[in-house]
Amino acid sequence: MRLLARENPRLEGVVNAIDFNQSTSGQRTISDTSLRKLVEILNRKRLGLKDVDTDLLGRAYEYLLRKFAEGSGQSAGEFYTPPTVAELIANLVDPTPGVSIYDPTCGTGGLLIKCNYKFIEKYDSKPKIKVPTYYGQESISSTYSMAKMNIFMHDMSAEIALGDTMNRPAFLDLKGNLQKFDIVIANPPWNDPHFTQATYEGDPYNRFLFGYPPNNNADWGWIQHMFTALNENGRAIIVIDTGAVSRGSDTKNTDKEEIIRKSFVENDLLEFVILLPDNLFYNTPSSGLIIGINKNKKHKNEVLLINASKLYEKGRPKRFLNEETIHLIYKIYKEWREEPNISKTLTMKKLINYNLNPSKYVKQTNKGSFLPVEEAISILKKTESDLKIVNEDLNVLLKELGFKL
């Protein structure tokens, strides 16, 4: 590992950061026997770049990340975006030559990598095309190392920084202001409770001009950070919890998140909102949203709402978006069109109480939709259990009334 880092400076502090002789209470964490078996497994195949298909190692690495996420549940979901969601975002971004793309909560770097592949797919055959520049920041050191390795394994260049983006953003200009980018993409921690009013008050980067989020939820704090990092024609595509677009809209009390949403709506900055199916993400069975923010909207004073909640394929352990669905959503956005039971365009004035959830405006029938087998079995078992209790209570009551059973 030390030799690899020495020959590949981009991996310095990444592959050589792990002590394979680490011990706990005098016992080796990983035995020599286990390490030897691992080396023997890797030694079965020639893995040089001339011996394997393009990006075989990158795809293998992504596979291991996914397996880790599936086994780790919620903790893994904080830094891993499902590949088909990342694919959809890359399509919506549709990167062009020379653009700058920034992910302030980059996790293992999946969104940046998908955008790079989308660009290569479209422009690789054209000579002398200026490639996009990629930037990312991650707060967890082990995840940061995985992002650096992931970028390296996919043979792309990106500047990845370690640190807490909300309190210590890494990418600043010469005046100490946030660096501006053409495109911001992110899947920040949903309903993040780790930031208080002290984080927002007196912010040296002037990020929270539309309002301070509540103490227990930084969704609109993250969104405002990303908005501030956009240049004058920039756009952001953000994965966020569904509650972020509706909390406070059904109450008469003043709600901090509703106030911030109102500012984005009235300043005509929201371009689209896509409601995703539930059970796509590793950290929650709930559905999520993709929000599009654009400082230079083509369709002024309009927002496109897409309800894709029924457009999924069943998988194990999670559902996923197939290629047809990804292409359909992209086409609807690109053509800015209304699709029956899927999408609707609204003027800002028709948004009810600044509620941006597509399900409120685009209703879908349940025709042709089915519960996953695991869900159906679970409901059936509970129903049988409830029925047993009811029958027992009924028998007791009939005996008390004198009926012979």
Image (cartoon, grey):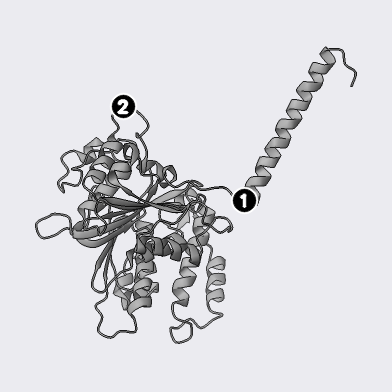
Q: Between residues 264 and 314, which one lies in front from this camera angle?
A: 264
* Farthest right residue in view: 404
Residue type at tag 2: Asn
Kindly identify the amino acid type of the residue bearing the numbered disc 1.
Phe
How would you rate the neighbour count of disc 1 (Cα within 10 Å): few for under 14, some for 14-19, many for 20 or more?
Answer: few
Q: Residues within 10 Å of mark 2 (few under 14, many from 20)?
A: few
Checking the image for residue 253, the label placed there is 2
**Sequence order check: which comes first, mark 1 or mark 2?**
2
Which residue is located at x 56 percent, y 80 percent?
Answer: 44
Disc 1 vs disc 2: Cβ atoms closer than 8 Å?
A: no
Task: Residue at 36% x, 69% y: name it.
Answer: 151
Q: Is residue 23 left or right of residue 355?
A: right
Residue at x-position 38% and y-position 77%: 121
Q: Secondary structure at mark 1?
A: loop
At which x and y percent is residue 223?
Answer: 28, 48
List x then y, in percent, for residue 356: 36, 44
Answer whether residue 280 is visible to the viewer in this image.
yes
Secondary structure state at the residue bearing disc 2: loop
Q: Quadrant of the C terminus?
A: top right
293 relative to 381 in the view: left or right: left
Which residue is drawn at the image coordinates 46% and 75% (left, top)?
Answer: 57
Extreme-top residue of the structure: 401
Asked whether the viewer can see residue 15, the reply is no
Q: Which residue is mark 1?
A: 370
Is 317 situated above or below 242? Answer: below
Is residue 78 depicted above or below 1 in this figure? above
Name the spot of residue 202 as percent of width and height, x first: 15, 40
x and y percentages locating residue 184 in the rendered image: 28, 59
Quarter of the image holding residue 158? bottom left
